[in-house]
């Protein structure tokens, strides 16, 4: 089919916080054959490329943005590629959704991903930020990552060529601006019923502590060393703080919620209020987790 170009894509339709203006163009990559054309586009284009994934960790700005969104709808879906004793290597395209991968793992009786229950986003996006919850970070499971960069093509990186830390991933070799094409992970064989039960329990726990069904971008700030950003924001009274349709969640103070017509400027104002209050009362600097 070739690369698809969409003019003036709306960021509010492409982000889970349902915010933001319009990018110049969106380029949809569907298979490996599209990568040469993407390379030509990026080498000529002056717009800033931005790999959007499922847009679930993004606070997109209002207005017209000089950005070319890159989205991969990458086959294949998850598949088993190798087995050593009880460990299975699973390969998954970066454009697949993490909840879909978890559903597949549950049906296939594969354990390892249960802690990531309730995290939206694409598999590539989750690797790019080393998403994590309940003691599991996706980087813990990754055995290889296949990256693509214009002019360099597709390159498999082994685990020791990947640097993962708290909400951070970077390839240990120079790739410049690259996109994640596919990922391999080590999972272990388990009873599908047990995997399902753990996922259900984690989802229930998340539902009672986080606004999982609301329009959010996940946690706004990273947890500072030794603290919970949510607890600090709660203590300084940010829970429920509201500007128009944008507010800090009543359930968990580190989530911004868009009640409908929230704007990016209101979100940024709330972020500043929270950051300043925490600095003044606790002398702790909050660092953003969401990408602006
Ligand atoms: N707390 C409050 N008030 C709040 C929120 C939290 O007092 O408004 C308290 C809780 O009662 C608890 C402590 O703070 O005692 C920690 O809260 P929680 O267990 O909800 O964990 P968290 O540190 O706020 C982190 C991750 C989440 C992840 C959960 C579960 C970050 C920034 N947050 O939250 O990840 O789901 O642990 O593992 O690392 C994300 O990264 O987007 C995210 C949601």
Image (cartoon, rainbow, N blue to C red):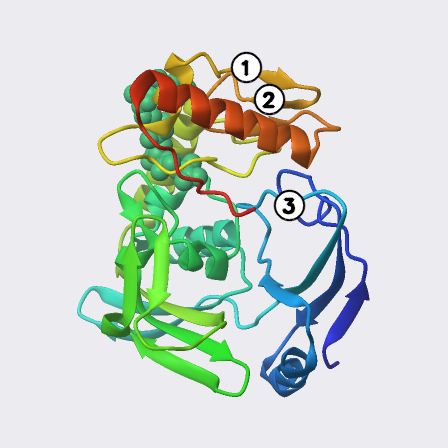
Q: Is residue 129 above or below residue 79?
A: above
Q: Is residue 260 above or below residue 190?
A: above
Q: Quadrant of the N terminus?
A: bottom right
Q: Quadrant of ligand 1?
A: top left
Position of residue 141 relative to residue 37, above or below, is above
Residue at 31%, 50% (x, y): give it.
137
**Ligand 1 within 8 Å, label 3 CB:** no
Please indicate, yes or no, whether residue 170 appears anywhere in the rendered image. Answer: yes
SS class of the residue under badge 1?
Answer: loop
How far from the left and from the top, in percent, is residue 117?
Answer: 41, 42
Q: Residues within 10 Å of mark 3 (few under 14, many from 20)?
A: many
Q: Are marks 2 and 1 in contact (CB under 8 Å)?
A: yes
State the CA–CA distance, disc 1 to disc 3: 22 Å
**Residue that lies at the very extreme toward the right in this rendered image:** 7
Mark 3 residue element: loop
To which residue does mark 2 refer?
Answer: 247
Q: Which residue is mark 1?
A: 240
Q: Residue at x 34, y 51 (%)?
A: 113
Q: Mark 3 — residue?
A: 60
Which of 105/5 is in front? 5
């Amino acid at each position: 089919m070739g690369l698809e170009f969409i003019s003036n894509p709306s960021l509010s339709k492409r982000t889970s916080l349902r915010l933001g203006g319009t990018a110049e163009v969106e380029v949809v990559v569907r298979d490996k054959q599209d990568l040469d054309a993407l390379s030509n586009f990026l080498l000529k284009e002056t717009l800033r490329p931005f790999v959007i994934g499922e847009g679930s960790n993004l606070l997109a700005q209002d207005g017209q943005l000089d950005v070319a969104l890159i989205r991969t709808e990458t086959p294949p879906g998850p598949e088993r590629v190798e087995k050593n004793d009880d460990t299975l290597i699973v390969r998954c395209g970066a454009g697949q959704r993490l909840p879909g991968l978890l559903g597949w793992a549950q049906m296939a009786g594969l354990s390892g991903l249960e802690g990531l229950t309730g995290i939206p986003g694409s598999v590539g996006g989750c690797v790019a930020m080393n998403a994590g919850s309940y003691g599991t970070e996706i980087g813990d499971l990754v055995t290889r990552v296949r990256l693509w960069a214009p002019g360099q093509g597709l390159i498999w990186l082994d685990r020791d060529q990947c640097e993962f830390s708290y909400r951070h991933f970077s390839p240990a070799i120079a790739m410049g601006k690259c996109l994640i094409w596919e990922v391999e992970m080590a999972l272990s064989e388990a009873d599908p019923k047990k995997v399902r039960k753990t996922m259900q329990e984690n989802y229930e726990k998340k539902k009672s502590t986080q606004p999982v069904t609301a329009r959010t971008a996940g946690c706004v700030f990273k947890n500072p060393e030794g603290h919970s950003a949510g607890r600090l924001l709660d203590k300084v009274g940010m829970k429920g703080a509201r500007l128009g349709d944008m507010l800090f969640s009543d359930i968990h103070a580190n989530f911004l919620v868009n009640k409908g017509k929230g704007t990016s400027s209101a979100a940024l104002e709330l972020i500043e209020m929270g950051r300043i209050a925490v600095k003044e009362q606790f002398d702790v600097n909050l660092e953003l987790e969401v990408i602006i």
